[in-house]
Amino acid sequence: MKSFWKFFESVKLAIVLFILLTLASVLGTLIPQGRSAAEYAARYGSLSGLFVKLQLTGLYHSAWYLALLFLIALNTIVCTLARLGPKWKRAFRASPEVDDKSLQAMKIKGRARFFSPLPDAAERIKGDLASRHYRMKTSGEGGRLGSAGSAGSGQMPSTSACSSSWPAASSAD
């Protein structure tokens, strides 16, 4: 069962299946579908027997074409299920601790200035993030605020540009 799962979760298999499906669809487009055997014999001569035998005259309803579609669907489902667990955990689990260097490397999308005492500014930031359904965790000596993401996002929100140490988050004391 493990080898079956490993085989169908392969992206290489998906690429091969898509190439085969593309080639088969090109054949189905080039060869007229659903005509009589006499029309194929008149148009393609001795190849008409091969076309009928390989079911190229009704390609989109043939067993092998439908099997190819089934294999692509199975591959897509297995690939999705194999990758869903880690993505789900990353989206809904608290993010790991972040060091100052990582915080400083983050792109800042906006800035906020709070002309209030530091504890009031910290509570306001927590309230703003909580109203957007972010889970917060304070840690460290400087009272660093980290965001664990929201229900629809595994990424750190743009409002957590305030995630630097508290003295940098407040411009006035």
Image (cartoon, grey):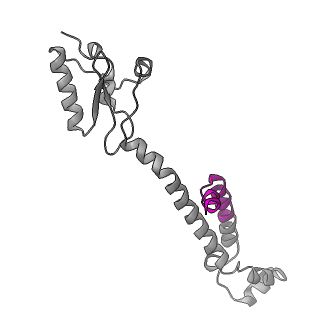
* Quadrant housing the N terminus: bottom right
Q: Quadrant of residue 76?
A: bottom right
Q: In this view, does 153 lie above or below 137?
A: below
View extreme (top): residue: 173
Q: Magenta segment: does it hold 113?
A: no
Q: What residue is at 71 percent from the left and 77 percent from the top?
A: 56
Camera-side residue: 88 or 111? 88
Camera-side residue: 61 or 165? 165
- For this view, does 36 lie left or right of residue 96? right
Q: What residue is at 65 percent from the left and 65 percent from the top?
A: 21
- For this view, does 123 lie left or right of residue 20? left
Q: What residue is at 59 percent from the left and 69 percent from the top?
A: 69
Image spot of residue 57 (x, y percent): 69, 80
Image spot of residue 45 (x, y percent): 83, 83
Q: Give the range drawn in magenta.
A: 1-22
* Quadrant housing the C terminus: top left
Image spot of residue 81 (x, y percent): 50, 56
Main SS type for the magenta part?
A: helix
Q: In this view, does 166 lie above or below 135?
A: above
Image spot of residue 156 (x, y percent): 37, 33
Camera-side residue: 26 or 164? 164
Q: In this view, does 41 lie above or below 88?
A: below
The count of marks equals 0
Q: Magenta segment: does it hold 10?
A: yes
- For this view, does 95 lie left or right of residue 20? left
Q: Quadrant of residue 24?
A: bottom right
Camera-side residue: 67 or 62? 67
Q: What residue is at 27 percent from the left and 32 percent from the top?
A: 136
- For this view, does 69 lie left or right of residue 115? right
